[in-house]
């Protein structure tokens, strides 16, 4: 998702992306993971300013989960 996000998103694209990620967290198939993602979103809102920033945010969220389950993170 981050790889195809625009370098200079419109305000609507930024809002839609943040809303999508919030909504996605409510429908994630694993109930435990969904609750964890919802909690993470309360602490760290999606950064939708650019492709690079969204990609970094997504990577950070992924790494949070990786660390919780004892796997190495991505750089």
Image (cartoon, grey):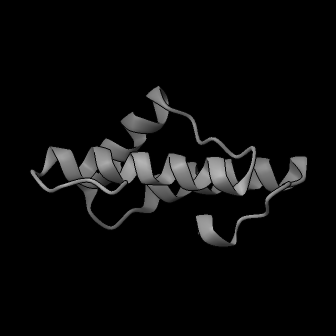
Q: In the rendering, at what x and y percent does residue 32 appear?
A: 22, 51
Q: Give whichever of 51, 61 is nearer the camera.
A: 51
Quadrant location of the C terminus in the rendered image: bottom left
State the count of labels. Answer: 0
Up/down of 2 relative to 70, above or below: below
Image quadrant in which you'd find residue 49:
top right
Kindly identify the residue that appears in the image at 49 percent across and 53 percent down.
58
Left or right of residue 7, residue 26 in this image: left
Q: In the rendering, at what x and y percent does residue 39 appear?
A: 37, 34
The residue sitting at the top extreme is 43
Quadrant location of the N terminus in the rendered image: bottom right
Kindly identify the residue that appears in the image at 26 percent across and 63 percent down.
30
Q: In the rendering, at what x and y percent does residue 56 appear?
A: 53, 49
Q: Give whichever of 2, 23 is nearer the camera.
A: 2
Up/down of 74 relative to 64, above or below: below
The residue sitting at the bottom extreme is 4
Left or right of residue 24, residue 63 in this image: left
Kindly identify the residue that appears in the image at 56 percent across and 48 percent down.
22
Kindly identify the residue that appears in the image at 90 percent across and 53 percent down.
10
The residue sitting at the left extreme is 70
Q: Give whichever of 15, 7 is nearer the camera.
A: 7
């Amino acid at each position: 998702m981050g790889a195809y996000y625009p370098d200079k998103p419109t305000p609507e694209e930024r809002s839609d992306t943040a809303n999508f990620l919030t909504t996605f967290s409510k429908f994630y198939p694993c109930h435990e993971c969904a609750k964890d993602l919802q909690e993470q979103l309360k602490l760290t809102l999606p950064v939708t300013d650019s492709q690079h920033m969204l990609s970094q945010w997504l990577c950070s969220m992924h790494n949070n989960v990786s660390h919780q389950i004892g796997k190495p993170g991505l750089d």
